[in-house]
């Protein structure tokens, strides 16, 4: 009798899980469709780079931040359909491989990213990086200057900010606000990184929350690989030749906005845009406005 009663429950759970997966895939597919992006994969060394690609025209390479993934750029890319967009999951992130024996430092990731770009028939491209991806992009532009048309740094890591951020103060106490401990903790993470969190349907938000919790141990390991590289990146900013746009949210709690002045002073041909009432990820929180600043910069 008990087994008979359990069978409908089992079927209901199975259908619910299948429904959640279907809704998630449809939602992601809808967002990518608006940006004309398709998911693809190519092997690069020990890693399998999963990435989105679409559009024609000059190429833009997007580099996401710590604990991020390729679809952090999808909503912004919807306003850039006149360009050829490439947005990969970095090694250790998203659907790329998480190999415990490898190092995930800024320099290592920049080298792998350059190997990844050798698979495309583009000699020059625009480079856009956010947070950790900004540090990777800054190093990349200094190491491979002949390949970069323009550089855009969004709330970028890699320098010592004149004023400490709230995150720096928390890390000094032994707390990392970017690590998600439970599904319920995801809301705290979103509130910390944004001023007005973007709307995410409940089922999809739960999926991202569960993924963040699952990836927490590996994200913590990656953080250890990158946390000591500020001086290394800052010392190379003078080598950057590309015209550079610096975008920063004025309410960034992760990397203090005062860091923008360091990039501005040390990169020869740079300009800065400060977005009011915006947090650490403008391309997620305000994708249309971020794309507008970027397009104005490209068309200048």
Image: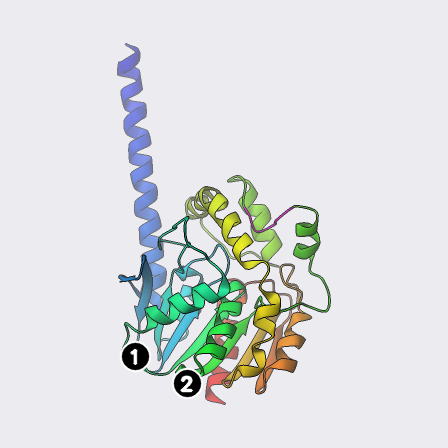
Residue 77 vertical placement versus 122 (above, below): above
Is residue 177 found inside the magenta-colored segment of the image? Answer: yes
Is residue 62 found inside the magenta-colored segment of the image? Answer: no
The reply to whether residue 248 is in sight is: yes
Residue at x 50%, y 64% (from the top left corner): 106
SS for callout 2: helix
For mark 1, what is the residue?
A: 56
Give the tally of numbered discs: 2
Using the numbered discs, state the Cα–Cα distance from disc 1 to disc 2 in whole angstroms: 21 Å
Residue 33 vertical placement versus 270 (above, below): above
The residue at the far front in this view is 101
For mark 2, what is the residue?
A: 146
Along the horizontal axis of the image, is 10 left or right of 292? left
- Residue 197 falls in which quadrant of the image? bottom right
Residue span colored magenta: 175-179
Q: Quadrant of the N terminus?
A: top left
Residue at x 41%, y 54% (from the top left corner): 102
Residue 50 lies, in percent from the top left, at 32, 59
Query: Residue 288: which disc?
Result: none
């Amino acid at each position: 009798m008990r087994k008979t009663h359990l069978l409908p429950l089992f079927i209901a759970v199975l259908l619910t899980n299948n429904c959640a997966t279907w809704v998630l895939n449809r939602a992601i597919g809808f967002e990518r469709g608006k940006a004309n992006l398709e998911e693809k994969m190519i092997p690069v060394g020990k890693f399998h780079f999963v990435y989105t690609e679409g559009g024609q025209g000059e190429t833009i390479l997007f580099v996401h931040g710590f604990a991020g993934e390729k679809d952090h750029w999808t909503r912004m890319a919807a306003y850039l359909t006149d360009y050829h967009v490439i947005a990969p999951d970095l090694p250790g992130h998203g659907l790329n491989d998480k190999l415990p024996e490898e190092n995930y430092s800024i320099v290592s990731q920049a080298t792998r990213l350059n190997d990844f770009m050798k698979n495309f028939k583009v000699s020059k491209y625009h480079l856009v990086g956010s947070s950790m991806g900004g540090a990777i992009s800054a190093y990349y532009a200094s190491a491979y200057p002949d390949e970069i048309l323009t550089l855009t740094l969004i709330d970028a890591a890699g320098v010592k900010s004149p004023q400490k951020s709230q995150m720096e103060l928390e890390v000094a106490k032994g707390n990392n606000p970017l690590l998600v401990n439970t599904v319920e903790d995801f809301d705290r993470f979103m509130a910390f990184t944004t001023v007005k969190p973007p709307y995410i349907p409940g089922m999809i938000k739960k999926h991202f929350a569960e993924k963040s919790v699952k990836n927490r141990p590996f994200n913590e390991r990656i953080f250890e690989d990158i946390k000591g590289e500020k001086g290394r990146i800052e010392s190379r900013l003078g080598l950057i030749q590309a015209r550079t746009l610096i975008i920063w949210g004025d309410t960034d709690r992760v990397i203090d906005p005062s860091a923008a002045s360091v990039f501005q002073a040390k990169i020869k041909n740079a300009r800065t845009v400060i977005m009011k009432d915006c947090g650490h990820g403008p391309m997620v929180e305000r994708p249309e406005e971020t794309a507008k600043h970027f397009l104005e910069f490209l068309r200048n």
